[in-house]
Image (cartoon, rainbow, N blue to C red):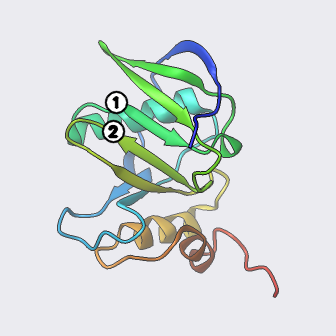
Amino acid sequence: MKPVPQDRTAGPVLESLAPGNRLRLKEPSAAKGCFDGAWWPRSREPVAEFSALVAALADRSGRVDRIGFNPAAWDLAPARLAHGPNLVRLAGFFGLQRHTVVVIGPRIRHLTLLVIPPEAPPGPAERALSAASAADSTDAALEILRDSGVLSRQPA
């Protein structure tokens, strides 16, 4: 899979609101399943949202080197974010599921997060966060998002 060409200007990490309870990770001993946790960004603005995600994960797991995402689900993203002395590479892949981001770092290795749409109401978003980060969760993105009420079920 080739990355999608992007603006090469390095974007700074902005002082955005901390994700707080908008990021949930499974315990290390939990079933792998499709996701290692879930994230509910506040917008589709990648500099602010990926900056907040990088800061939250760096506090827990160390440096973040890369974030892979589907560019169709986000506003235009730079190729890199500055995080202190480090640069975080942002890589857009249209082949990546639209409700997914992949985070890579020296201690993180490969973290796959369910991305809950920013416009999701709080109740369904909370249910999706809990479902994706549950120790026994192995469901796919659309199943979690539909079962939680974030996405409506389409008639067959």
As drawn, is 131 to the left or to the right of 96? left
Picture coordinates of residue 108, whole percent (x, y):
25, 44
Asked which quadrant contains residue 76, the reply is top right
Q: Name the disc covering residue 56, or none.
A: 2
Picture coordinates of residue 122, whole percent (x, y):
57, 61
Residue 53 visible within the image: yes
Q: Which amino acid type is shown beneath numbered disc 2? A: Ala
Q: Is residue 152 above or below residue 65?
A: below
As drawn, is 42 to the left or to the right of 32? right
Residue at the extreme front of the image, as rendered = 1
As drawn, is 127 to the left or to the right of 5? left
Residue at point 62%, 33% (across, down): 45
Frontmost residue, 121 versus 36:
36
Quarter of the N terminus within the rendering: top right
Give the number of the mark in front: 2 or 1. Answer: 1
Secondary structure under the numbered disc 1 in the rendered image: loop
Q: Which amino acid type is shown beneath numbered disc 1? A: Asp
Residue at point 57%, 75% (across, down): 148
Q: Name the residue under label 1.
A: 65
Secondary structure under the numbered disc 2 in the rendered image: helix
Picture coordinates of residue 70, whole percent (x, y):
61, 45
Q: Earlier in the sequence, mark 2 or mark 1?
A: 2
